[in-house]
Amino acid sequence: MSLVLKEEIDLLEVPLLDVILAYLEATEESGATQYWEEMTEFLILMSLLLEVKSRLLLPEAYPEVETELSPEEAREQLLSRLFEYSKFRSAAVQLRESAEAAAAALLRAPAAHPRRRLPALEDIAGTGDVMELHDCLVRLVGSKRDPDTGHIAQIKVELRRQISIIRRVLAKKGRLSFNSIFGGEEPLVQALSLFALLELVSRGEVRVSQSRPFGDIVVIAQATRETA
Amino acid sequence: MSNPRIDDATLKALKRDVEAVVFASGTPLSTEVILQALSLQEPVDRDVVEEILGSLADEFPPQGERGFELVRLAGGWAFRTNPRCQTAVSALFELPEDASSLSPAAVETLAIVAYLQPVSRPQIAEVRGVNSDSPVHTLLEREFITEVGRSPTGGSAILYGTTPRFEAMFGLSGLDELPDLEGFSLNDSQKDDLRRRLGMLSVPE
């Protein structure tokens, strides 16, 4: 289509070889990078032109095929398509000019910080602002953080370690307040520390006292300490 | 610029806000979004905002004396540098890619999509007379076109339409700014020439 419009093809008078040479020249000029693809397209185009040209040159070779187009019809069809195609071809030239003019100006890059206000999706829907909807979705997806699993993170606590802590404090001070040492710990740590304390009690290493239910536990080292 | 509903001081503050919001956006901002950003009501405040934008556009006219201009682009408003300052700006910044790197086939395909959208690949190929998969792929990659649906007929072929990026890159305020396609029709003389070359008219002696 393009070659016919560029007046490089006169189907009746120009030999096919000239058409091919004109095509190759045009390809070279345009610096087409998709060479093989362009060639394939060219072959399809050539087969179409060959058919039209053969109909023009040998119209009597076709009349027996009633279902096929007459030479006139084929030409009319091609002409009609060329007329239609020519409009888009000119529009493409205009578009390229518009783009070149627009490229002379520089839009600011979007602000580095994401916009705070997220318009409600239902407000955007129907406004036709596809870019806004796109931005909104990107920000929504982008703002999703990894879920905080801190509350279910494994707490590393061992009975032996808790026993060791109690022993160390008692070795230094002789007594300790359970709440002052373990009051700020996680419930699980507190529970295990209590088990550790009970273990030490059972071994006779410590003595414990509690002035009231659920009150602080005072731990006092026994004079004689048994080892496990 | 005056509005009977709003006093001058409020109007000035509003104008300042509109200017700031459009400037901060960096990308075209629709009137709807500006209204929302400034907690204004649709439709009562729309006229005010549009009046303000019009006033700002007068202050920053295209290719005027200012270093930047306020333009309608891709369905919204955006500040951009004055094209007359291209040399100065390009000395410091790389100007955005333009359509010059698009092949003629790609620009043709883009024109077809722009005017006929939503349009399928077979429809594009029919207009161009050749398979257009490659240019369609390029345009999709460059985000000038996008899939917009499936054809209810023709084997559910994918339909393509242009993107706001296309409008922005080609300096269009919207698709309705595209020139009338019929304006690109060949004139009678050109048509006759084509007919002649197709052997449908005798060559004048």
Image: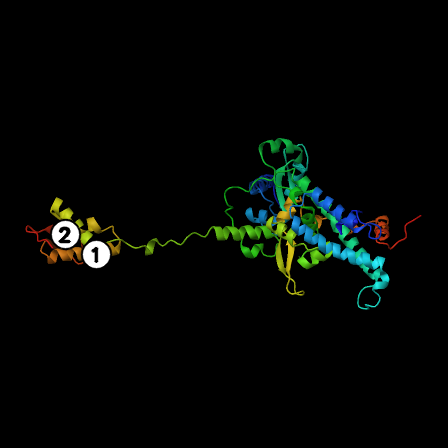
Q: Position of residue A6 (x, y in %)?
A: 78, 47
Tell me the SS state at disc 2: strand
Residue that extends furthest to the right in the rendered view of this protein: B205
Identify which amino acid the numbered label 1 is placed on: Leu
Q: Which of marks 2 and 1 is nearer the N terminus?
A: 1
Identify which amino acid the numbered label 2 is placed on: Val
Residue that extends furthest to the left in the rendered view of this protein: A224
Q: Mark 2 points at which residue?
A: A218
Residue A101's image quarter? top right
**Letter of the chain that mark 2 sits on in the rendering:** A
How many residues crowd mark 1 within 10 Å: few (<14), some (14–19), many (20+)?
A: some
Image mark for residue A216: none
- In front of the other: B11 or A148: A148
Q: Position of residue A31 (x, y in %)?
A: 67, 43
Q: What is the distance, in whole Å, between disc 2 and disc 1 at their CAs?
A: 17 Å
Q: Name the residue under label 1.
A: A192
